[in-house]
Amino acid sequence: MTFKTVMAYMRSEAELKRVMATVELLVKTFPDLHCTGLYSIPSPIAYAEPNGFVDPGMFEMHDKQHKERSENLKQLFEAGISAMGVKHEFRIVRSETGTAADGVIASCLGAELLVAGQPDPDDPGTNDETAETIVFHASCPVLLVPYAPALDVQSFDRILVAFNGKREASRAALDALPFMEKAESTEIVWIDPPENDDENSNDVAQDLVATLGRHGVDAKLVLLTSHGKAAHSVMRDYLLAQRMDLLVLGAFSHSRLRELFFGGVTRAMLSSLAIPTLFSR
C-alpha cells in the first residue's frame, strides 16, 4: 500500500517550512506521490461602524492581505516541491465561512492524506483552531506537524500506535498501514487496558496485531500502566524515551463537546505535539 495523493495545507512562511520538511520525508517514503499545496481564504467577518454601515475598505484590505500571502506561499511551495522532483499543483480556495478550515475540508475530499501544521501561539497566521476542526471533519487522515518538535525526525521508521480498544484507534491504525509497511518497527501501545479474570482480555489488540501481520507488519503490543498520570503524558514520555518518528492516534473517541468541557487525549495531544502525529477518526 502507498499514498499517491497528498494535500499540504499552509498558512504562513514559518508553517510552510515545517510542512514542506514533512512532505520531503513523505517523498522519501512514497516517491510516486502527487502533492497539492493549499491555501484557504476565509470569508471576511463584517463589523458595522457606529452609524450602522459596513466599511467597504475592510473587504478590500482582507482580499489584498490574503492575495499577497497566498501568492508568496505559492512561489515558495513550487520552488521547494520542484526541487524534490514531485508532481504537484497549488490551489487557492475560498471558504464560505469565517474559518479557513471549511475550505480545507471541502478541498481534501479527493486526498488520501492531509499534511497540516499544529497551531503556533506565536505565529498570528496559524494560532487559530483550524487544526482541531480539520482533524474532526476531514475525510482523510491528517498528519499534523509540530511547531516545536521534541525530537529531530528524519524518517518514519519507528511508529507508535496509541490504542485504547475503541473504533477510532483501530481505524487510525489501519489508515496508517502505508507507513507501517515501510517502517522498521511498529508498536501498538495500550495504556491501562481493562483488567479482568479473562486471560484473553487483550484479544481486541491481538486481533489488530494479527491483521497488521497479514500485511507484513511485525507489530509489537506494549501494555503500559499510567499509575495515575494522564494518558497523554504517559504516551509522550514513552515515545520520547523510545525516540519514535510517528505517532498514530484515533481522534475524538469521546464526543467533541465532552472533550471541550472535560478534556481528552485528542485535545491534549493537539496542544502538545512532540513528533509528527497522524490523526484519524
Image (tube, grey):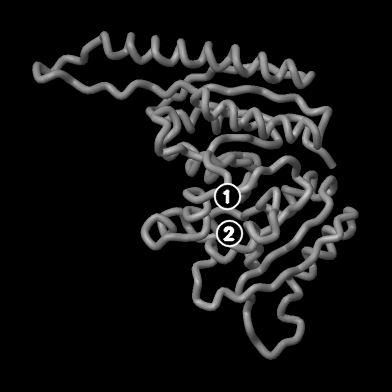
Pinpoint residue 273: horizontal percent, then vertical percent: 55, 49
- Note whether residue 275 is visible: yes
- Specify whether 12 is left or right of 186: left
Q: Is residue 200 above or below residue 95?
A: below
Label whose residue precedes the other's in the sequence (1 or 2):
2
- Identify which residue is drawn at 71% across, 80% down: 201
Q: Which residue is mark 1?
A: 274
Pinpoint residue 73: horizontal percent, then vertical percent: 55, 17
What is the quadrant of residue 143 in the picture? Answer: top right
For label 2, the crowd category at 10 Å Cα-Cα, with few meaning under 14, some 14 to 19 and many 20 or more, is some
Return the residue nearer the eye: 53 or 210: 210
For label 1, the crowd category at 10 Å Cα-Cα, with few meaning under 14, some 14 to 19 and many 20 or more, is many
Amino acid found under the numbered disc labelled 2: Arg
Pinpoint residue 120: horizontal percent, then vertical percent: 45, 37
| Count of numbered badges drawn on the protein | 2
Amino acid found under the numbered disc labelled 1: Ala
Mark 1 secondary-structure assignment: loop
What is the quadrant of residue 128 in the picture? Answer: top left
Q: Is residue 261 above or below residue 24?
A: below
Q: Which residue is mark 2?
A: 236
- Specify whether 205 is left or right of 150: right
Mark 2 secondary-structure assignment: helix
- Identify which residue is drawn at 47% across, 53% down: 267
Q: Are marks 1 and 2 in contact (CB under 8 Å)?
A: yes
Return the residue nearer the eye: 99 or 180: 180
- Identify which residue is drawn at 61% across, 55% down: 250
- Identify which residue is drawn at 77% across, 19% down: 87
Return the residue nearer the eye: 145 or 237: 237
